[in-house]
Image: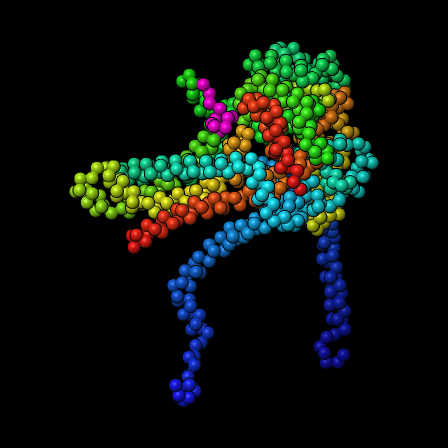
Amino acid sequence: MEGNGISRRGVLRAGALGVAASTLPLVNVHGQSSGGRLALGLWDHWVPAGNDAMRKIVMDWGQKNRVEIQLDFITSVGSKNLLTIAAESQARQGHDMLSFPTWEVHSKSNLLEPLDDVMGRLQEKYGGLNPITEYLAKVEGTWRAVPAISGSQNKPAIGRFDLLKQHAGLDVQAMYPAADKAGPGADEWNWDRFLKAAESMQKAGTPFGLPVGQFPDATDWIGSLFQSFGATLVNKDGDITAKSDSVRQVLDYAKRLCAFLPNDVFSWDDASNNRALISGKSALIFNPPSAWAVAQRDAPDVAKQCWTFPAPAGSNGRFTPYLPYFWGVWSFSRNKGAAKALIEHLSQREQAQAMVAASNGYDIPPFDSMTDFDTWRTEGPPQGVVYNYPVRPHHNAKQFVACNPAPPAMAVQMYNQSIQAKMIARVSQNNESIDSAIRWAEQELEGFQRG
Amino acid sequence: MSQGTLSSPVAPAVVSPQSTLRRLARRNSTVAFLLTLPLILLVLGLVVYPFFYALYLATLNKRMTRFIGWDNFTFLFGRQTFWDVVFQSVLFAVSAVVLKALIGFILAHVLHALPAKGQRKWRGMLLVPWVIPPAISTLAWWWLFDPSYSAFNWALMGIGVDPVPWLGTSGWARFSVILVNVWYGSPFFMIMYLAALKSVPDQLYEAAAIDGATGWQKLRFVTFPMMRNIISITVLFSLIVTFANFDIVRILTNGGPLDSTHVFATYAFQVGIQSGDIPLGATISLFMFPLLAVFAIFILRGVNRRNKEMA
């Protein structure tokens, strides 16, 4: 070792420093993000506090599991969430996990990671979930996404109990109190009674605010109306079944109902019905509690007189409009394990309860066992206003998405092109015959059959 | 030819690479190319590539897993709704452009006749609709047309006139979307025509006046021929933009009522993005191309012919 200028002590010191230095990054990585990085694109909640609650849940989970979180809230206004999904599916890169609106799971199923393991554990823990989620997210026997809590909504009737009692003789608070029992009059709550009430309320100057345009609020309540008459345009095998007595009956009924609605409902968008209720111009709409929440802020006197109750029943049963969101993981995600673990965490009862509370009861968890949260009992005034917002056993109702049971690839086109609402508009607004409206629908539906 | 001539050695010109580059850089065409390069790249990236990508998409099946050739096109030819959209797009674009051109022409003449001092103020005010982002101004229009709380209807009812279903019936809804487009686009025509008017030599009007021409004759035989090229180019440009319009229809009517206000862009969006059929959506949007090509051929042929006549 003579002559190289490096002492034995120096070599040892450098070696020790080297070893110490080489462990530093490991310690650092382990300390901050051993679980890697996770990019999330979640639905931008209508209720402002919804985003804060979700951010807290996600960030706490990330910190606990040492996962670096990148969280984006993507709005559904202007279909920006749909554009994001379309762009990321084409580019095969983007977020690891996304919120998928109602119909998007099926159309992107070949790019979504199977989540049977997550769903298996959740179902084992929380029991049954509504069959609509299965229809929308289980593709060829495989769960391609998990029904989300945040953003999933029902659209039951929300009305002015004072006006309905005074002018239509409907005591909706007595029919559907904030308790697990139905009261007097609930067994007669059907579309015939609804029609009579619509007539009375129109005469009283506060007509029902039911949109019949080309927006989801219209499609959702009309979808449930069709289903409660047993009027199916396309069956589960994709066969067109529009030419039927039940379709004729529902169109005939809808024409009679439209006569008692405001003239302009054919051009209403998703905000028009909310405004009609909040401004005191309308006695009843089909909507999540967001209308009541806005009324509480902008028109507290109106909000105090609001009450949520199930949609009327028809010959085929009672169907509550339901529009779920889903959490899915792209197959090209670089952190599938963490994404799946987060989805499982978000679906737990504690997180569901926190989200329901933060959203004033707006969010609807997919599991039947999660409809007992206190939020729905305590929200007000009036206290219990949203108690009947989740579907409860005594409602004798099922959650329903419009255009079901058509194969989702067809149903999404029927839904977004508002086929049922257009049929009603043809009959009611254009005064076409029912058979002519059915013929038109058949032509449109034939086009949707292409693969 | 002698062998000597053939075999005489020719000294090769010695050109250094540096001087070649310098000469290239000094050429006007090179400078022009470099200056337009950013725009060329933008056009390539945002127009040419998407166009060919749309062509590719239009040949795929709904799930984008299979090549199906022209099937998407033939499918659309058999759909009544598609032909309604074609009709509405042409109606929307042609009527809006004609009205915009007419209003722009009148406004330009009114402005041109104003004294120079006040002209700038009016010019600025009349340009306001064009400089507001259309998505925002359309929201304001939506408030004016709102089915339940229309400000127009409130005013109409104030003078005892029945409310108008601005967005509720097919006829009124078509009128409303065209009206908003005309309101938004007229200032563009106005400013282009004003620029053209200012370039017409005063001597021509003086000569016409000496010949005893009336105001109408001056307009018909002096102003109009001098502006024809500008009018043609402006109309073509506006046709392209109006055909591709999306925001006005999307915000005001979402294509309704009964699909009677859908144009190519909104229908393509509904079918492609919202209904999950991207290939069919791409196919619908491609139909703008042949229609615009027909308009462009006729208009540009006229412009060329007039240029040759003038030359």
Q: Residue at x 43, y 21 (%)?
A: B155
Q: Main secondary structure of the magenta part?
A: loop
Find residue B268 and report its horizontal and vertical position in percent.
56, 40
Find residue A265 and report its horizontal and vertical position in percent.
56, 23
Q: Residue at x 45, y 38 (%)?
A: B93
Q: Quadrant of residue A119?
A: top right
Q: Residue at x 34, y 51 (%)?
A: B305
Q: Residue furthest left?
A: B210
Q: Nearer the viewer, residue B37 or A2?
A: B37
Q: Nearer the viewer, residue B51 or A80?
A: B51
Segment colored magenta: B162-173
Q: Quadrant of the N terminus of chain B?
A: bottom left
Q: Quadrant of the C terminus of chain B?
A: bottom left
Would residue B165 be counted in the magenta stretch? yes
Q: In this orientation, does residue A73 appear?
A: no
Query: In the rendered view, does A189 fall on the left or right side of B157?
Result: right
Query: In the rendered view, does A447 fall on the left or right side of A62?
Result: left
Q: Residue furthest bottom?
A: B4
Q: Residue at x 55, y 29 (%)?
A: B258
Q: Nearer the viewer, residue B284 or A20?
A: B284
Query: In the rendered view, does B250 fall on the left or right side of A85?
Result: left
Find residue A276 and report its horizontal and vertical position in percent.
56, 22
Would residue A231 be counted in the magenta stretch? no
Is residue B71 positioned above or below B13 on the image?
above
Find residue A408 and report its horizontal and vertical position in percent.
69, 36
Q: Residue furthest right?
A: A124
